[in-house]
Amino acid sequence: MRYRILLFILTCCFVGNTHATDKNNSYTLYLVRHAEKQLDGSRDPVLTVTGENRAEQLANWFQHKDIRVIWSSDYHRTRDTAKPLLSRLGLKLSIYDPGDLPGLASQLLQKQRTALIVGHSNTTPDLARLLCDCFIEDMDESEHDRLIVVTIDSTGTKVKTLQQHQLFQP
């Protein structure tokens, strides 16, 4: 009888510990395209006033999302989109190479930390596809308000696509 009670207690501890570990392994990756950029003909333009406002709105929305890491390609428009949130959270920017999205996807999946990744119209959907192995629509060059949310936990990967204007409505 004691053996059965001991076995039951050990089983409960193991199951309880498994559930706690699974919950701890849950994390979310938020993928956005940089905010609106100036059309000045340069290869590395800065944000427009509208883009700066969008970056501030994103910082307002993300500041309570438990972001642990912020990734950006090394361009003014992506760094400047991340800048307000970096400042609020006191984080340092992690730079990634947009030419090595498989390498970035591997790091994101390996580190298992909630993160914001600021990219481009051509890299953001591609990165999402690598993370979820699912269909994600391409982004048009004029699209700046799509937010792709990839949540990974013990049950698998879930993907949601939101429009940023929905986030900012009162």
Image: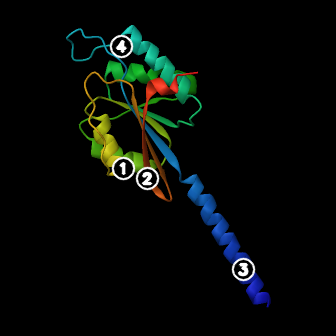
Residue type, mark 1 in image: Cys
**Residue at left 36%, top 48%?**
131
The local secondary structure at tag 2 comes to strand
Judging by the rendered image, the residue that carries numbered circle 4 is 47
Judging by the rendered image, the residue that carries numbered circle 2 is 157
Q: Gap between marks 4 and 2, in whole Å? A: 33 Å
The answer to whether the residues at label 1 and label 2 have Cβ atoms under 8 Å apart is yes
Q: Quadrant of the C terminus?
A: top right
Q: Gap between marks 1 and 2, in whole Å? A: 6 Å
- Asked whether residue 97 is in view, the answer is no
Q: Gap between marks 3 and 4, in whole Å? A: 61 Å
Q: Nearer the viewer, mark 3 or mark 1?
A: 1
Residue type, mark 4 in image: Leu
Quarter residue 156 falls in: bottom left
Name the residue at the left extreme: 41
Q: Which mark is residue 8?
A: 3
Q: Which mark is residue 132?
A: 1
- Asked whether residue 10 is in view, the answer is yes
Q: Earlier in the sequence, mark 3 or mark 1?
A: 3
**Residue at left 48%, top 29%?**
92
